[in-house]
Image (cartoon, coloured by chain):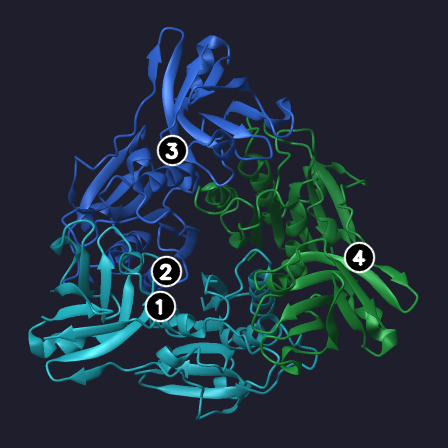
Chain colours: A cyan, B green, C blue
Amino acid sequence: MTRVVLLTDFGTADGYAAAVAAVIASAAPEALVEHATHDIPPGDILAAAFTLARYAGLYPEGTVHLAVVDPGVGTQRREVAAAVDGRFFVGPDNGLFTRVLHGASRARIVALERVPADAAPTFHGRDVFGPAAARLARGEALDSLGSPVTDPVLLPIPDPVPFPGGSRGEVVQVDRFGTLITNVPGSCLDDAGGRGEVRVSGRSVGPVRRTYGDVAEGALIALVGSLGLLEVSVRDGSAADRLGVTRGAPVEIRF
Amino acid sequence: MTRVVLLTDFGTADGYAAAVAAVIASAAPEALVEHATHDIPPGDILAAAFTLARYAGLYPEGTVHLAVVDPGVGTQRREVAAAVDGRFFVGPDNGLFTRVLHGASRARIVALERVPADAAPTFHGRDVFGPAAARLARGEALDSLGSPVTDPVLLPIPDPVPFPGGSRGEVVQVDRFGTLITNVPGSCLDDAGGRGEVRVSGRSVGPVRRTYGDVAEGALIALVGSLGLLEVSVRDGSAADRLGVTRGAPVEIRF
Amino acid sequence: MTRVVLLTDFGTADGYAAAVAAVIASAAPEALVEHATHDIPPGDILAAAFTLARYAGLYPEGTVHLAVVDPGVGTQRREVAAAVDGRFFVGPDNGLFTRVLHGASRARIVALERVPADAAPTFHGRDVFGPAAARLARGEALDSLGSPVTDPVLLPIPDPVPFPGGSRGEVVQVDRFGTLITNVPGSCLDDAGGRGEVRVSGRSVGPVRRTYGDVAEGALIALVGSLGLLEVSVRDGSAADRLGVTRGAPVEIRF
């Protein structure tokens, strides 16, 4: 049972997401269409790139991930399909797959060639990407969809900058709970015995802890989150609200 | 694998949508329940009628579409099921199926007759429409569900009004991206070589273009959208915000 | 076809919900993952308890319900799995299952024992509950997951208090339509011939009616809702807005 998993910024109320699901159901009737999310903020490719990387590799090998956050639809950007560590990906070549490609063991990318002549220039999800995903779900080879691409668009996601005794990074995502997810890998704490003092926008949030139970309710806490990245939360609250910060806020860790 | 595809204004947080899905899963265990949307604005039958038409016909023949936006539940409105161009539809007879019926080649409609005596008067989605959809998904004949109806309720969706050298219509839907979808069919441009100058609420939005790439980022653009209707957008922005208009705003095209 | 049905407060935009679905798809590939809701207000265990009870028992026997609203993740609360009247439940032991257990005929609960050592302390949905749900979906026995628990955490949901000629209760949930759902069972009206006069926060909303059609559009109405509980609505409107009340508001019925 092959799954086609959708991520878009379409919302569901207008029926665009259902149109994509319908096209796949018609073209690959044996595939199972699943909805990861349609709630990516409109046009926010960076948010989509992080969200996609949070679940894509957890699906079984052979799963087809269709990702459409596509403010450039109808412009010159390419349409691509990729095979990354056993899963397939289909979508616009605009950086959506940056985090999935980051650190992949094996990746092969092609530019879609058989874009239908009558594809609506405003809805490639339905007319281009959905049909391509269905072909992969039916077992067609990636190479049959187009010619190799070696220069996919990648978002310039910043790396943390080490300094003597510490590292400087930033908030790269704020989740629904107001947790600040940073670009600082938890592994940078290994040499420091897992310890370090964390500041966000110059304000101390204390040492790195292991779990929410280590602080009182309502307290700020820094820990290594489920993505393996340094996170800052408020236990049973929102760190984004408490600290008044958003994506891009500077984060500093001192060992 | 027969699909039952749900559209409601229930949201998901209260569990009403899941209750409908559960009833179908129990009554037709081999059917696949899919969620098109539960985010129709509460009671907005017109929005639902447009959304449903955007995807219903793209699903494979035999698909059962369950649509429940039902501010009249518990009043005298009829419950109906229909077969339209190979797909089935179940829901209240309140105009929800106006756009699906519009331009259909074949349509047969019945009024549901076996409404259970203990159906909750406030939740026909669970107690009436869900079970009826399950019966269709199990292969029961439409005619076994009730007696023919020839006068379904249809919403008075306005047609554009031609005038010498142009046509006057209105905005019929505003989507998540702030795109204004009008009732002016793209085909009205055929005699004009696809050209025309568009105004919304008296303000010019320029000529009809082919695709977003034809204007700069942030610019207004009129084009024929993925439904075959004239649309007005802002590239990478919201036309609804830019122009300060909503459903019902007047649209004029001059050739 | 065993179903695993998810309820969380994760939203979908961050990819946490999809990560849970992915883990189940990998560990129990033949199971069907369904999404009841991810829109429970963050941390609102009481709302989740009512929502879950609205649909859980309508699914076929053998269905696995995974419920994760878990503000205590990473603290000392237990992880549990339960078999209640033929369906399975997995989640934190924090009261989520209060309404499902309330009035159940048969219930068996175990505390999960094989929590993986490398489980992220902030994401038990992915690392603990998802895998446990997958094991149940594959047919493993409940008892193989842990040792019996006889004192599950139960939320102190108030019972209505009878007084001579009436009963006093409160609003326990406000749904998307602004309907006030109370803790007063419709059965308390049986001796009064289904009649009674209802007040919310001291304001009369009239007698108990049968259906929305019994009052004019825009009018307040009290009736026994689809859960068998007394509800207060505005026909085609919001009782919560009209009366300016929320969860906890006092409700009184006089026979």
Q: Give the alpha-carbon distance from disc 3 to disc 1, as whole Å.
A: 35 Å
Tell me whether circle 2 and circle 4 mark residues in contact (CB < 8 Å): no
Q: Which mark is residue A55?
A: 1
Q: Quadrant of the N terminus of chain B?
A: bottom right
Q: Name the subunit of mark 2.
A: C
Labels 2 and 3 positioned on one and the same chain: yes
Amino acid bearing label 4: Gly
Pointer 4: what residue?
B103
Q: Residues within 10 Å of mark 2 (few under 14, many from 20)?
A: many
- Of label 2 and label 3, which has the lower sequence position? 2
Tell me which residue sits at (41%, 17%) in the image: C252
The numbered dot on residue C247 is: 3
Q: How far is the residue under mark 1 from the one under mark 4?
A: 42 Å
Q: Are marks 1 and 4 in contact (CB under 8 Å)?
A: no
Discs 1 and 4 carry the same chain letter: no
Percent coordinates x, y for residue A9 in the rendering = 50, 66
Q: Is residue C253 visible?
A: yes
Chain hosting mark 4: B
Q: Report the amino acid beneath label 1.
A: Tyr
User: Do marks 2 and 4 both belong to one polypeptide chain?
Assistant: no
Q: Secondary structure at mark 2?
A: helix
Which numbered disc, 2 or 1, marks the residue closer to the eye? 1
Task: Name the residue at 41% across, 15% down.
Answer: C188
Q: CA distance from mark 3 to mark 4?
A: 47 Å
